Amino acid sequence: MLITKASEYALLSLIVLAKAKDPLDSETLSRELAISKSFLAKILQSMSREGILKSYKGVNGGFVIDQSPKDISLLSVMCAAEGKNPSVMECAPSVNDCPSDKALTCSLWPIINKLQGKIDNFLGTLYLSDLIEE
């Protein structure tokens, strides 16, 4: 499945953070979005490690977007949230990575691979700014 809950929650939290004037902590975000705090905290930390978010510690701490929303592609958000490239199907991204070593004889792999490439390219052209209501 392409868009998992992790990707969905990452995108939703970025929309809220983009509209916020001050840093928001994971508890505030989880309450506002009705998302598990522990699950959301992991996603936020992943986005922080990837440079999408910046985290601040302390009483007034929390997360802020560390880049312009025009520079944050949906593909980069989804990769950070998933810890890997989002995939259309549970299929190897290359012939050499096929767990069954049958990619060269698989009739689905070439089509899935082309589809994955088109989706990756498309998600790379969409940005957080496209999701934020002006």
Image (cartoon, helix red, strand yellow):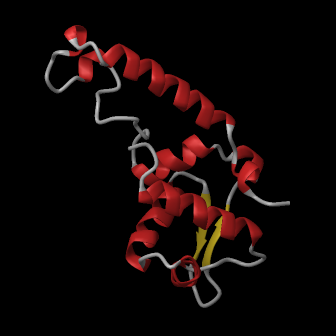
Residue 132 horizontal/vertical position (percent): 75, 58
In the rendered image, the residue lying farthest to the bottom is: 59
Residue 6 horizontal/vertical position (percent): 44, 58
15 sits to left or right of 78:
right
Residue 56 horizontal/vertical position (percent): 60, 75
* Residue 102 figure quarter: top left
In the rendered image, the residue lying farthest to the left is: 100
102 sits to left or right of 47:
left
Image: 85 above or below 118: below
91 sits to left or right of 73:
left
Tell me what residue is drawn at x 47 percent, y 75 percent.
35
Tell me what residue is drawn at x 53 percent, y 31 percent.
120
Residue 98 horizontal/vertical position (percent): 22, 23
* Residue 36 figure quarter: bottom left
Picture quarter with the N terminus:
top left
Can I make out residue 48 in this image?
no
* Residue 85 figure quarter: top left
In the rendered image, the residue lying farthest to the top is: 105
Can I make out residue 24 in this image?
yes
9 sits to left or right of 56:
left
Picture quarter with the C terminus:
bottom right
